[in-house]
Amino acid sequence: MKHLALLVRTVAAWLVTLLLVFPLIWLVLTAFKTELQAIAVPPQLFFTPTLESFREVNLRSDYLHHAANSVITSFVSTLLGLAIAAPAAYSMAFFRTRRTRDILMWMLSTKMMPAVGALVPVYVMAQTAGLLDSRTALIVVFTLSNLPIMVWMLYSGFKDIPPDILEAARMDGASIWGEFTQVIRPLAMGTLASTGLLCLVLAWNEAFWSLNLSSAKAGTLAALIASYSSPEGLFWAKLSAASLMAIAPIVVVGWFSQKQLVQGLTFGAVK
Amino acid sequence: MSFLELRGVEKHFGSLKAIKGIDLAVEKGEFVVFVGPSGCGKSTLLRMIAGLTEIDRGVLFLDGRDITRLASSKRDLAMVFQSYALYPHMSVADNMSFALRLANVDKTTIREKVRRAAEILNLTQYLERTPKELSGGQRQRVAIGRAIVRAPKVFLFDEPLSNLDAALRGQTRVEIAKLHRELGATTIYVTHDQVEAMTLADRVVVLRDGSIEQVGSPLELYDHPANQFVAQFIGTPQMNIVDSTALPALRDAAGVTGPADGFIGVRPESVLVRPAGRGRLAGRVGPASERPVQIVARQNERTDLQPGDAVGLDIVPASFHLFDRQGQLVSGSARG
């Protein structure tokens, strides 16, 4: 009986995992097919892999240019976001007022609004400032849209640090900067790292604003992928190849930082 | 001017006045204890001196300098927290030397000072450990070490013993007293435990509801409490306070002089238990809730008295305190 239950659980777990990973596996397979193989019915599971689509994608569009845009916009927006969110979270976690909770809720509520709701004003502002199709515009928008999450995550991480410790540092002669670099940073390293990583991933995957605010010059990898669902029709193999190239770097980063990420997200729980 | 001086210091939390105009002068080398029931403002007052809580009104002088608005980090005070507040990511040695490293003191001096402090506090073999590898008592000593390494102008202690078990508390209390004698450092110590206050202090400051009730040496407070609150707060068991109209015979028994109306205070050790029929007062051994007046007596001799037994009582001559209806001392004849 016990044995059976275990078996059922294991099978169920594998089914769910397969369900979640299947699209990704299919994407990888399709990327190595020709366009004909890609639309073949019934779908082919076994075939001779080809790098044709990758070559095509590189020929037709400048992968490196888009990749550079993605790297720059996501990294700069993450660093900028951390620089703004950390002091905000610090003051909310250690100098609470009656309004702190309201401010946090209000910040989070901005994430409830669909991005398209802000499209027109943001677009007009970017246009007026002459920032359409510029990395600057993307960096600003990515930073601002990730700020609420960053503040929330850092706030919950910082809250786990006993305020006494910071007061002790203050009595020991630490300035605010000293308090932050010598006490908070080492104690909240997990939180800081996981927050940064999450926002890096979010900015990397961001498609809505990159599509609307940029084109050839500042377009990110998300925009590159989208360009393969063109009026000429869907090119599944090339689309898959482009997608694979777009997600590969961030998957690798995520893979290596998995431990740090999990540790950061469960920091408060296992203290 | 005194070494540390508070003039009309106030703190408001919204409409609540937590600290109501405190005037206090602390001399160099003195060991002053703030004592009072919880919520009396003693910790708030200490935090105001430390600069961790802002002073809303009044001025604070340290060593001739106005430090009312100065940041904690620049006040040159060291504080030992109730929770120890050690830096969990640093070794014991790093915890103790943190302030010196921030002040850019050279490495040899730091090492020497840490070594000496560790020796005084018996921590030498733990210097490389992190706080979580230490027992409560050891953590407490590291917290004290962190303070003495700096040789600050004033040591501030915020209920440093309340997280320790009873045996360790007694032992650490003795160590703190010894440390103060050796270093001669000005110390302000907050506690809710009047025994701690009485055993450690040169002077005790009794606080209630954000105001000072009385300042004085432990014996002064014990023998000459300024009011009923101090009289009952200091000393265990508590001083007996009896409404003079409830037991008129007590007045004569204690030889009270002064106005007839008010409350008579007599310490338990001043109440002498006599065999039944002797003594100037008659009573019965408690618990006797139906009796109008309860008096606690402290006896050092063994006794086979049982609850309900009749006894006689005498009051040690010249040991009464007379308080008016507002609780202020009117007259007292206590020794000292």
Image (cartoon, coloured by chain):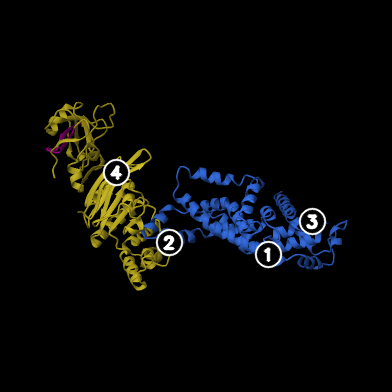
Chain colours: A blue, B yellow
* Residue under disc 2 on the same chain as residue under disc 4: no
State the residue position of label 4.
B36
* Residue under disc 3 on the same chain as residue under disc 2: yes
Which stretch did the figure color magenta? B310-323
Identified by mark 1, the residue type is: Ala
Residue B232 image position (x, y, % from top left): 24, 39
Q: CA distance from mark 2 to mark 4?
A: 35 Å
Q: Secondary structure at mark 3?
A: strand
Identified by mark 2, the residue type is: Gly
Residue B268 in which image quadrant: top left
Count of numbered marks: 4
Instruction: Please give the name of the residue rendered at 52% of the width and 51% of the height, measured from the top-left corner.
Output: A156
* Chain designation of label 4: B
Identified by mark 3, the residue type is: Ser
Which numbered disc flags the more N-terminal residue, 3 or 1?
1
Q: Is residue B93 left or right of residue A249?
A: left
* Residue under disc 3 on the same chain as residue under disc 1: yes
Res B20 visible: yes
Crowding at label 2, few (<14), some or many (≥20) Cα neighbours within 10 Å?
A: some
Q: Magenta residues: mostly which secondary structure?
A: strand
State the residue position of label 3.
A230
Q: CA distance from mark 3 to mark 2?
A: 53 Å
B320 within the magenta span: yes
Q: CA distance from mark 3 to mark 4?
A: 78 Å
Q: Closer to the camera: disc 1 or disc 4?
A: 1
Crowding at label 3, few (<14), some or many (≥20) Cα neighbours within 10 Å?
A: few
**Circles 3, 4 touching at the beta carbon (< 8 Å):** no
The circle drawn on residue A178 is 2
